[in-house]
Structure formats: C-alpha cells, structure tokens
Image (tube, grey):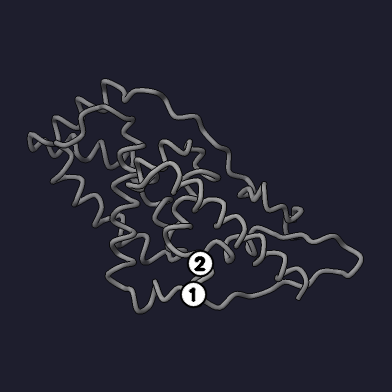
C-alpha cells in the first residue's frame, strides 16, 4: 500500500487523518455529577467514567510516548490518580480538557523520572533517538508520510511535543494549551514555533537523505 505523502511546510505541519474538534465552553452537567459520584466512592460511576474517557487518555499517552506498553501503563496510573483526585474537578473546564491537563502533567513527570533515557535533549530541542529516513525521487518536491512525521515528533523535547500535539493535533487555542501545560501563552507560542521549526528541519532532512 502506498504511503500517504504531503508537502513539507513549516507553517502547516498537520497530522494526516486527524480532525481537530472544537472544545465546548463548559463541562457537561453529566460529567460534573459523574465526578462527584466518583469522589463519593461510587465504583459504578468510575467504571462509566473509564469507559467514556479511556481512549482519550490512552491516545494522548501514545502520542506523547510513541510506545504502546508505556502508554498502557501510564493510562492505568493516570486513572488511579484521577480516582483519588477527581473531587478537584469543579466543572470550570470540560472534562476532556481537565483530563488532558492531568495526562500531560503525569506524562511529563514520567519523562522527568526517566531523564537519563528520555530527556537527554540537545540544545536545539530534540531527543537523541534514532530516526529512519525515507528516500524520495530527485524529481519530487520534499514530501513526507505519516510514519516520517510520527518519528520526527518523537524526537522533539517532551515540552515541545506536548504543545505541538495539543495545539496542532488536538486543536486547543494557546490560552488553553498554557493552562494545560502550566505555562504562559507566550511560552506556548514560542514552544510551538520552535517545535514546528525543528519538525520542518527534521522532515526536510529526511527527504533530502
């Protein structure tokens, strides 16, 4: 099967086949009530919550780690964390946004705990992980496929990766990304710019190799 390809563009490094979804302005009453039931020790409510949001948490963990086993382990740890902390959910944001914040915090903490393996980043914002390049015909314009894009994202420093995924893949605005990551809007914009620039360089190099 032919790989899907697209033009390398530093300003539009989209993830193929991912559709950005708009975020509602308020959490649903159902989610708030569900959270309160869980906080009160209702295990049936927690099982319902897990069914509703397991895929959301797992997908974000997988996009951050690019490792199925790590994503599965982190997902379980995060739901244990959520079970004990969900009483702090006040409905001031959507449940999805709240979960993204919890997930990003836990994944970044996971990276910090494994700093020797995961955070030995270079000054240009990449992780020293091997990447496989794909050759293209000299007559073609620079192009990339989804596998090349995923591998390039995997080389970003965790902080850059989180901002890129939340903004360009999940569709959050910078104000929301800043709240989720616990930084300023200016930092979010700066990290996204650097992430896009680094991805552009990695993907351009992959096509020229």
Count of marks overlaid on the render: 2
- Residue at 41% of width from left, 76% of height from top? 120
- The 10 Å Cα crowd at callout 1, few under 14, some 14 to 19, many 20 or more, is few
Q: For mark 2, give the secondary structure.
A: loop
- Residue at 75% of width from left, 76% of height from top? 209
Indicate whether 64 appears above or below 88: below
What is the x, y in percent for residue 36? 14, 30
Q: Quadrant of residue 100?
A: top left
What is the x, y in percent for residue 41? 8, 38
Q: For mark 1, give the secondary structure.
A: loop
Indicate whether 35 appears above or below 109: above
Residue identified by numbered label 1: 122
Extreme residue toward the top, this view: 29
**Front-most of residues 75 and 128:** 128
Q: Quadrant of residue 149?
A: bottom right
Gap between marks 1 and 2 measured at Cα:
6 Å
State if disc 2 and disc 1 touch (CB < 8 Å).
yes
Extreme residue toward the left, this view: 40
Residue identified by numbered label 2: 125
């Amino acid at each position: 099967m032919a790989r899907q390809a697209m033009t390398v563009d530093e300003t539009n490094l989209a993830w193929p086949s991912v559709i950005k979804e708009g975020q509602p302005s308020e959490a649903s009453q159902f989610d708030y009530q569900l959270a309160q039931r869980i906080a009160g020790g209702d295990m049936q409510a927690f099982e319902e919550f897990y069914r509703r949001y397991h895929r959301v948490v797992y997908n974000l963990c997988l996009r951050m780690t690019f490792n199925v086993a790590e994503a599965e382990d982190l997902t379980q740890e995060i739901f244990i964390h959520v079970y004990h902390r969900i009483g702090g959910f006040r409905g001031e944001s959507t449940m999805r946004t709240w979960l993204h914040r919890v997930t990003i915090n836990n994944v970044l903490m996971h990276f910090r705990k494994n700093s020797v393996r995961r955070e030995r980043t270079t000054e240009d914002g990449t992780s020293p992980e091997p990447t496989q390049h794909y050759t293209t015909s000299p007559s073609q314009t620079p192009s990339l496929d989804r596998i090349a894009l995923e591998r390039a994202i995997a080389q970003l420093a965790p902080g850059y990766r989180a901002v890129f995924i939340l903004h360009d893949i999940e569709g959050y605005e910078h104000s929301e990304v800043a709240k989720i990551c616990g930084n300023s809007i200016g930092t979010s914009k700066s990290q996204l710019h650097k992430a896009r620039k680094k991805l552009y360089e990695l993907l351009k190099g992959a096509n020229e190799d």
